[in-house]
Image (cartoon, helix red, strand yellow):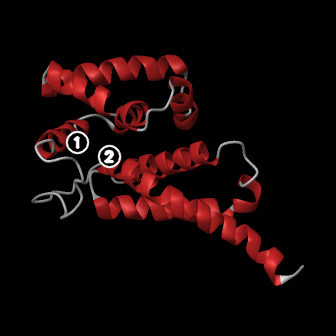
Amino acid sequence: MTADELAAPDDEFVTFATTAAPRLRRTAYLMCRDWHLAQDFTQTTLTKMYVVWKRISRADNIEAYSRKVLLRVVLDHRRRLSGQELVMAGPPDGTDRAEPGRSDLRLTMIDALGCLPPRDRAIVVLRYWEDQSVETVAEVLGVSVSVVKTQSRRSLARLRQLLGDSRADLLVEDA
């Protein structure tokens, strides 16, 4: 094999990682509410994918696979550190790119998401922020479609309770 043939899979991975990293980091942030930890989760996800890239690069939907790996990384981390909580004085500078006047609402919603258990949060983030189908969310999380539907309904009810109906409905509309 020539050097170019050996470098081709690496080039494919670099292209994938470059385009997928911002999406993965944003999803990780919505799950953990910490930009630095979200970056760690993204790097861990990409590392795990790189190790098996030759096998998975032929998969039908690499994006869905990357979401599944990311959510497993986040949920595994949550299980290991379930008793710890990171307290921050405020969000990091430059993290909110929402239009002016909506940043408070966005932060309020992110705080409300933090009140949900990790799997419920994953369901809400994938369904409404990532705009994934019920079937895709079920596959990514390894649960049944009925679990996704039930937990979505319960999680939205909880968010409505925390935020009020009109603000929780914005979560679904803005996603």
Image-based side of 50 in relation to 77, left or right: right
Residue drawn at (70%, 61%) of the image: 53
Tag of residue 110: 1
Across and down, in percent, residue 36 comes to: 31, 64
Q: Quadrant of the N terminus?
A: bottom right
The one nearer the camera, 97 or 26, is 97
Residue 118 sits in quarter: top left
User: The disc labelled 2 sits on which kind of residue?
Assistant: Leu
- Measure the alpha-carbon separation of dots 2 and 1: 7 Å
Q: Quadrant of the C terminus?
A: top left
Image-based side of 53 in relation to 142, left or right: right
Across and down, in percent, residue 150 comes to: 41, 17
User: The disc labelled 1 sits on which kind of residue?
Assistant: Ile
Residue drawn at (64%, 65%) of the image: 13
Residue 149 sits in quarter: top left
Dot 2 or dot 1: first in sequence order is 2
